[in-house]
Amino acid sequence: MAYNFKMLKARYLFYSLHFKRPAGTSRGVLHQKKSWFIQIWKAGHPEVRGIGEVSIIPGLSIDNEKDIPKELDGLCQHINEYKFWITTKGAQFPAIRFGLETALADLHKSGNQIFHQNEFTNGETGISINGLIWMGDPEFMRNQIQEKVNAGFNCIKIKIGAIDFEEELNLIRNLRKQFSSQTIEIRLDANGAFNAAEALQKLERLSAFDIHSVEQPIKAGQTEIMAKLCQKTPIPIALDEELIGIKTIQIAKLLDIINPQYIILKPSLLGGFSVADSWISAAEKRQIAWWATSALESNIGLNAIAQWVFEKKTQMPQGLGTGQLYSNNISSPLETKKAALFYNPALPWQNPFD
């Protein structure tokens, strides 16, 4: 992508996304989600503009939320120093790097938010996605599960770790009584909620229910303990938070030490698609499977991730069903139907800068 960066202009906008209903995780309950949009265009040609999203999750993103507006101010003032910023600040602000990378790619492709012309963006083929079950009281979680089953999902991802473990076991036990593993695939996301001393025991109890995988059973950063868990676990383990903040040169070493069964890629938290591609390359060399998930972006970020995923030709259900979470999401061609994410070219994009 060849640009004279001195000929570019940029601006950004803060946007607060509001959940339709509280989203419970082991890190707390989310009511709103902060995002910033970067818009970039060539000087003298404002009619074609690329847009990217800077998306963070407090307590998970390594980007310092308080510093983001200041960094975006500096970035927009000195957009011609893009290469300098990416090498000195990119590792500190992966969410900004993702937004900048996406905005430049969109501008390069004429600013219509179509990065790849393929069966997905033509509206012909969807991307298989899992149905996401948020934490809450058992009745609330049961109702969510029933909604997803009724909607045709055959892969359910259940967030665990916020309520009593015995209640969670009962919830999963009842689901498995209704549906075999051939009918419904169950993924669990612990978000690091298990105590390291009891994690293996909990995994063993969960293994009675034909679980596909458990994401991040213990908190990130306990490398040796996680490595032992991945070696002994009766359920495949997927690394998620463990990947955030890891420098590209450290990727191979981390995978060699822990040797997980899966890794989960959130491009906006890792630093963009080039970094995510490095994870995929290293994982595939080690026969480690992967899938991608949204980091609760608006439809702008979700669209970019979905198009990137589709180009990978993976058949595994992806974690890209978050577009319906917000009451004020950016209107877009993205649609969820038949347990898949589709792009409907007949639907227009909303411009948040208007």
Image (spheres, rainbow, N blue to C red):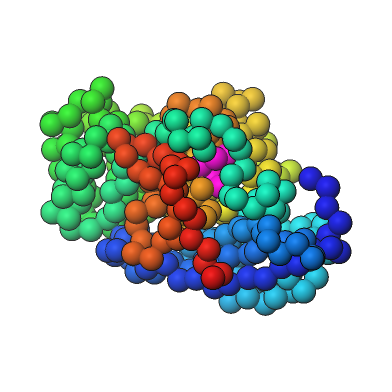
User: Which quarter of the figure is the C terminus placed in?
Assistant: bottom right
> 124 and 97: which one is in front?
124
Where 338 sits versus 93, above or below? above
Residue 231 in picture, x, y percent from top left: 47, 30
Q: Residue at x 53, y 63 (%)?
A: 351
Q: Taking the image as drawn, is residue 172 in sight?
A: no
Residue 65 in picture, x, y percent from top left: 57, 72
Where 186 sits versus 273, above or below? above
Q: Residue at x 51, y 30 (%)?
A: 119
Q: Taking the image as drawn, is residue 335 in sight?
A: yes
Magenta stretch holds residue 320 = no
Where 24 sits versus 266, above or below? below
Region of the chain picked out in magenta, as a range = 304-308
Q: Quadrant of residue 315?
A: top left
Q: Residue at x 51, y 42 (%)?
A: 306
Residue 329 vs residue 6: left or right? left
Residue 281 in picture, x, y percent from top left: 65, 31
> 352 and 85: which one is in front?
352
User: Which quarter of the figure is the N terminus placed in?
Assistant: top right
Q: Residue at x 70, y 75 (%)?
A: 73
Residue 317 in picture, x, y percent from top left: 40, 33
Residue 174 vs residue 181: left or right? left
